[in-house]
C-alpha cells in the first residue's frame, strides 16, 4: 500500500505537515497563548474554555486544558508536560497517561515550526509509544511497510 | 478509544526484533529455529519475543511440542492502525481549525 497515511500509522506515529499563511511567531503563539488555544483545540463538538486552559510556558511547565462535550457537558481533562521548548521553533509535549481510556503510556506530541517564505511550515508528530522506537534503523521502516501492505491486502 | 489490548499491541511492536519476526511471519509460518536464524540472539531470547507477540495476539503458535510453528495473526495490527488513523483525523481537524483561526487573526492584524 502506497498511502502515506497508512504507512505513518503503521509506524505508530501520526505525522502531519501543514503550511500556514502566517509568520512563524504567530503560529507558535497560537499554540502557546491560552486565548488562542481555546479557539482551535476542539475537537469537533467540544469546547475548550479559556478559563480552564493553563500553560506554564517553560521546560518542565504544565500545559493543561479541559475539553467539554457540547451535548452531554462531559468534561475531559488533558494534561501535558512541556519537555522541549525553543521559541518560535519547537514545542514538545508529553501527555499524562490516562488509564481510564486505556492510555497507560504517555504520548509525545512534537511540533516544529520553520519559515516557508512568508508562510510557516508546521510539522507535527504524535505517537503513543516513542520509547522503543528506533527511526534510525534503516531496514525496519521498509520491512514494516511491507508487513502493513500484506496485512491490508 | 484505545484499550488495554491496544497497549499490548503497541508495546509488542515497539521492539525491532519483534517487528522483524512479524515481517518474516507475514511470508508464512515458521519455527523458533527458523525465526532465530537471521538474528544474533539466543533461542530462549527469541522464545521470549514470541511470548510477547503471542500475548498481544499478534501470533498464534502450534501445539506440537517439538516445533510449535508461529503464525501471524493480523487483527490486532489492523486495530492498531485504525486507532492511529482516528487519531490522525482528530489532529487534521484540529489543524483545520488552527488554519481558520490564523486566517481570522491575520485579517484583524
Image: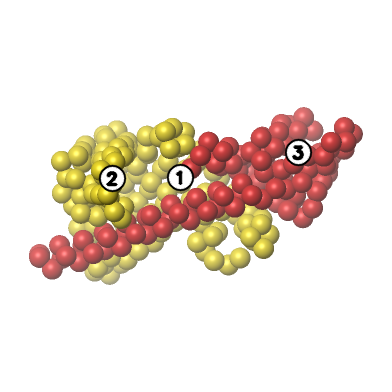
Quadrant for the N terminus of chain A in the image: bottom right
- Find numbered disc 3 in the image and state the secondary structure of the residue it sits on: loop
Out of A85 and A44, give the one closest to the viewer.
A44
| Residues packed near mark 2 inside 10 Å, few (<14), some (14 to 19) or many (20 plus) | few
Compared to residue B84, the image places residue B16 above or below, namely above
In the rendered image, the vertical position of residue B50 relative to residue A22, given as above or below: above
Closer mark to the observer between disc 2 and disc 3: 2
Question: Which residue corresponds to mark 3?
Answer: B40
Q: Colour of chain B?
A: red
Image spot of residue A44 (x, y percent): 30, 55
Q: Quadrant of residue B11?
A: top right
Q: How far across and how far down the image is residue A144, in percent? A: 63, 54
Q: CA distance from mark 2 to mark 3?
A: 55 Å
Q: Secondary structure at mark 1?
A: loop
Chain A colour as displayed: yellow
The residue depicted at 84 percent of the width and 36 percent of the height is: B63
Viewer-nearest of labels 3 and 1? 1
Amino acid at each position: 500500500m502506497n498511502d502515506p497515511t497508512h504507512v505513518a500509522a503503521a509506524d505508530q506515529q501520526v505525522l502531519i505537515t501543514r503550511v500556514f499563511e502566517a509568520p512563524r511567531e504567530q503560529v507558535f503563539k497560537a499554540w502557546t497563548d491560552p486565548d488562542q488555544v481555546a479557539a482551535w483545540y476542539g475537537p469537533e463538538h467540544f469546547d475548550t474554555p479559556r478559563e480552564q486552559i493553563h500553560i506554564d510556558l517553560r521546560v518542565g511547565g504544565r500545559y493543561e486544558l479541559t475539553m467539554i462535550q457540547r451535548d452531554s457537558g462531559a468534561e475531559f481533562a488533558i494534561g501535558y508536560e512541556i519537555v522541549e521548548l525553543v521559541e518560535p521553533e519547537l514545542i514538545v509535549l508529553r501527555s499524562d497517561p490516562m488509564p481510564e481510556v486505556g492510555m497507560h503510556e504517555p504520548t509525545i506530541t512534537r511540533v516544529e515550526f520553520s519559515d516557508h517564505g512568508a508562510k510557516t511550515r508546521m510539522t507535527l508528530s504524535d505517537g503513543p509509544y516513542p520509547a522503543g522506537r528506533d527511526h534510525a534503523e534503516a531496514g525496519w521502516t521498509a520491512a514494516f511497510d511491507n508487513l502493513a501492505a500484506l496485512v491490508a491486502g | 478509544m484505545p484499550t488495554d489490548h491496544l497497549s499490548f499491541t503497541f508495546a509488542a511492536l515497539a521492539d525491532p526484533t519483534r517487528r522483524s519476526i512479524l515481517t518474516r511471519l507475514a511470508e508464512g509460518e515458521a519455527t523458533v529455529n527458523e525465526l532465530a536464524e537471521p538474528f544474533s540472539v539466543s533461542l530462549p531470547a527469541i522464545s521470549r519475543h514470541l511470548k510477547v507477540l503471542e500475548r498481544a495476539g499478534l501470533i498464534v503458535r502450534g501445539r506440537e511440542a517439538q516445533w510449535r510453528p508461529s503464525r501471524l495473526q493480523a487483527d490486532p495490527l489492523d486495530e492498531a492502525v485504525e486507532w492511529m488513523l482516528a487519531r490522525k483525523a482528530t489532529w487534521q481537524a484540529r489543524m483545520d481549525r488552527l488554519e481558520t483561526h490564523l486566517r481570522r487573526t491575520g485579517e484583524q492584524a
